[in-house]
Amino acid sequence: MSDKKKKKNEVTEDTEKDFPKTEEATPETEEKGEEKAETENKKESDELAKAKDQFVRLAADFDNYKKRTEAEKAALRGMVVSDTVQMMLPILDNLERAVSAAADEDSPLKDGVVMVLNQAKTAFENFGVKPDIVSFAKGVTCGYVQLGGVAVSRKIADYFDDNVLQCGLTYSGHPLACAAGVACLNYYKDNDILGNVNKSGKVLGEILEELKAKHKCVGDVRYIGLFSAVELVKDKATREPLVPYGGDKLGVMGGIIGKLKAKKFMTYSHENMILVCPPLIITPEQLREEMVKLDEVLAEVDATL
């Protein structure tokens, strides 16, 4: 055998060794292959269906858990609010008695009690309490025309469908004042003023907390929505007021307010507190810009301590 032919045979043998011949497909082997593939596909489909079922069950269980915990939280919150309101009612009654009994109309003490009373009466809005009767005044016309009123629940209103309410004054139901009130309420609704109050109020609260942490003259800050106060003190540890209650004979607070007004930061004070109550239409950007002025004046107060 020639070397060339011998080499060719060796290559052929090596090839057959590396790549053995596959068994030729027959109808029987093809059927077995199809059955095996079908079995594997069915197994995968069953596993996928099982996993999907487990996921759906788990999602349903979690959804039920969320609903259950939310219901429990709502019930607990309702109990807390109910208990709080019941405890507050006698306090409000006593505050009203104190205001009625005050002999001096210009007493700073009476002014303070009236402020606390008014704040307490409106606090319900932030705790999910639905009162039967609510009185309102200046804000309903934005202060441009005098108007006051009383809003009652449907249950109370229905009572007077068949029963006469004997009340009324000479200027009750004044058309101009009522028109101003309706226009103002429509503006509140159409321009989402409450939404802006919530958004800007959050920013105001954050800024006030920063001022409290930064300035030694700030004993505390209190805020809800866009209604807030900065309490000034001589000493944070003792919380001694910057000026005595009802006795700012040196006009310290007046001087601080004067510095704010010089910066076009228009506000006023009550005892040792600076009231920060910006317009309800103020934007977060405008609020941040204006609060820099308060920051600067508080730094000056710090320097005097």
Image (spheres, rainbow, N blue to C red):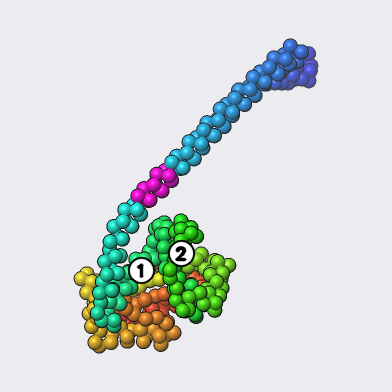
Q: Tag on residue 205?
A: none
Q: Amino acid at mark 2?
A: Val
Disc 2 versus disc 1: distance between alpha carbons? 32 Å
Q: Which residues are magenta?
A: 69-79
Q: Residue furthest left?
A: 238
**Residue 111 visible, this orientation:** yes
Q: Residue furthest top?
A: 28
* Closest to the observer, 103 or 92: 103
The residue where tag 2 is placed is: 164
The residue where tag 1 is placed is: 119
Which residue is painted at 28% across and 87% down in the image?
Answer: 251
Which residue is painted at 34% across and 77% down in the image?
Answer: 274
User: Could you tell me residue 138's position as x and y percent?
Assistant: 45, 75
**Residue 286 visible, this orientation:** no
Residue 45: image quadrant is top right
Q: Is residue 129 above or below residue 273?
A: above
Label 2 secondary element: loop
* Closest to the observer, 296 or 278: 278
